[in-house]
Amino acid sequence: MNWVLDADIRSFFDSVDHEWLMRMMHVPLSVQHRWYTSVLLGHYGYYGRPQNFPALHAFRQEMIRIWLTCLRRRSQKSRRMSWQTFGDVLNRFPLPTPRITHPWTVRAA
C-alpha cells in the first residue's frame, strides 16, 4: 500500500516547475521557509481528512528531503550539509506539522 502513496507524492513533485525551483534555491532561507510553509499549509488544508494523516506526514517528509537537496545544491561548500546540520535549520525555521483540517461529516438522519 505504501508504494501507491509514494507514487502519488512523486507525481505531485513531477508537476513542479524545476526552473522556478532552481531560482528559488538562491533566495534567503526566510523566504524559502515562507514558501515551503505555505505549500504545506495549503496541502494540509485540502487533503486534511480523517485517516489521511500518514499521507500528510509522508508529504511533509518529502518536502523536508527536497528542501535539504536544494540547500545542498546552493554551492559546492554546502553539499556537505548533513541531516544534523539541516536539523539546526529546521529548528530555526520549523515547518508545520500535519493536521486534520476536515472533521468527519455528520450524516443527516
Image (cartoon, grey):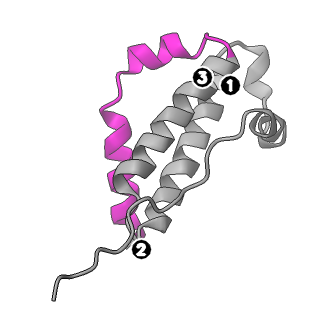
Between the C-alphas of marks 1 and 2, the distance is 34 Å
Q: Could you say whether the residue bearing mark 1 is in a helix, strand or loop?
A: helix
Answer with mark 1 or mark 3, whichever residue precedes in sequence.
Answer: 3
Q: Which residue lies under the disc numbered 3? A: 32
| Crowdedness near tag 3: few (<14), some (14–19) or many (≥20) residues, C-alpha within 10 Å | some
Identify the amino acid type marked 2.
Answer: Gln
The amino acid on which the numbered mark 1 sits, given as a three-letter code, is Arg
Q: Is residue 42 magenta?
A: no
Q: At x 38% / y 61%, what residue is drawn?
A: 5
Horizontally, is 85 left or right of 31 in the view? right
Q: Callout 2: helix, strand or loop?
A: loop
At x 52%, y 15%, the residue is 24
Residue most extreme to the left: 109
Task: Place residue 51 in its image quadrant.
Answer: bottom left
Which residue occupies 42% across, 15% down?
20
Q: Is residue 7 magenta?
A: yes
